[in-house]
Structure formats: C-alpha cells, structure tokens
Amino acid sequence: MNVKPTIAILGGTGDLGSGLAKCWLAAGYKVILGSRSAEKARGVASGLTGDVEGETNVAAARAAEVVVVAVPFSNHDQTLNEIKEVVQGKIVVDAVVPLVPPKVSVVQLPPAGSAAQIAQQILGSGVRVVSAFHNVGATKLHQGGRADCDILVFGNDKDARDIVIALAGEVATAGVDGGVLANSAAAEALTSVLIGINRRYKVPGAGIRITGLVAKSGV
C-alpha cells in the first residue's frame, strides 16, 4: 500500500496485541487499541510511543481501515458479533488461536475448521477476512525490531492477503502467502505444537521459518 492504513487491534491491551502495536507504531502506522474497557485501552496506549489511541473494540473497529482481532478464543465470537456492522467493506485480520485450556499444547480445532473460518461465517461476505500472526510469540514482538520468524498469511481475497503480508513484514522477518482461508487451520494448529516446544525446550518463543524464499518486508 502507498498510504499506511490506520490499524485497530482488538484485544490490544494483551501481550500479542500490544506487541503488534509497538511494531507498527515504530514503522509509522496509526494504531487504535481496542478493549472492552476504553479506559484500560487508553491506559495501555499512554505507555506506547507514536500515533496511538485507546477505544472500545467497536469504536476502534469503526475508526480503522484494517482491524486485527487478537482476543482470547473464548471471546472470539462475541467480539466479532459486536463489530460486525462497523467492519463491512474492511479487512479483518483474525489472529485468534482456538486454544482450549488446560491442554493448550494439544491441537483442538473447532468443528468449523478454524477460528478464521468462523470469523468469515459471522462477518459475512462483505468483509475480507485474512488470517495471520498465530505463530509469532509476543515476547519476540516486545523485544523491539522485527521478530526472527516468518508469519503465514491466509485469505480468499488476494489483494487483502497481500496487504496483510506487507504488514507482517513490518513485525517479523517476512510475511508468507499461505493461500486460501481454509489453510489457516494449519497455522492455528501449529500454535499448540509451538507451545509444547516452548515448554519442552524451555524457550520463550519458538517460531517458524520458510526456507527457500527471499525475505521481503515493508508496505
């Protein structure tokens, strides 16, 4: 994209959401943190550097061109239903992983196939749903600079997918085109595998790299 879009991050007060915010703010994007509590969102925003605001999830989604959903899976459907009317015609990036405590290191995909497919069903055909940011550890994002991993990006709309691939290149080594939205199940499942690897090898943020590609980054 030639003009940087305004990005709303719903669940922006959490580890992943605030980590993504730091990276995009450093790259010159305007970011609106969304939360169920506008006061909490503004409190977190006040500790960040750059063009950043805090709002409720709905207000943040209304004001942005790209909306990133980074809430817990238990709040996934409710959040999507709340923002449905205000995100029509926009890109919604689903970064939610269907983790089911207490066995979060065991793959437990929903009957619909993936969180991203649920998002498309709830939001409807008027929203371009893209799936990304499942396999980048929040710890890596908060360290500053680009995380040393690749980010798989999925979506049925190629233009929307390309926009998110470029955004992924701002926070990690590269965004990688993973194909259609249904393929998101692979990345969502992989998150549980990586959680298990983190525990067994006692590392803070195992990630993935796709070999054989020339890394590209930036919008």
Image (cartoon, rainbow, N blue to C red):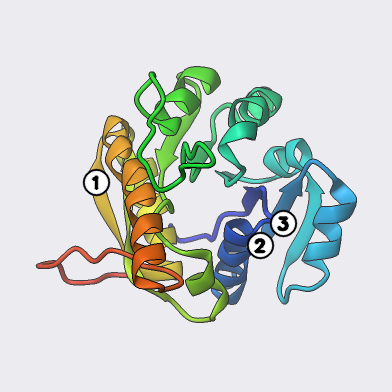
How far across and down, in percent of the image, does residue 150 sit? 31, 64
> Residue at image x 83%, y 69%?
46
Q: Quadrant of the C terminus?
A: bottom left
In the displayed structure, 130 sits above or below 170; it is: above
At mark 2, the secondary structure is: loop
Name the one closer to the observer, 155 or 36: 36
> What residue does disc 2 label?
30
Image position of 215 (left or right of 140): left
CA gap between label 3 and label 1 equals 28 Å
At mark 3, the secondary structure is: loop
> Residue at image x 38%, y 60%?
166
How far across and down, in percent of the image, does residue 62 sit? 71, 37
Q: Amino acid at mark 2?
A: Lys
Would residue 72 be visible to someone looking at this image?
yes
Name the one closer to the observer, 131 or 139: 139
Q: Quadrant of residue 74?
A: top right
CA gap between label 2 and label 3 equals 16 Å
Image position of 103 (left or right of 86): left
Q: Quadrant of the N terminus?
A: bottom left
> What residue does disc 1 label?
178
Q: Amino acid at mark 3?
A: Thr
> Residue at image x 49%, y 43%?
93
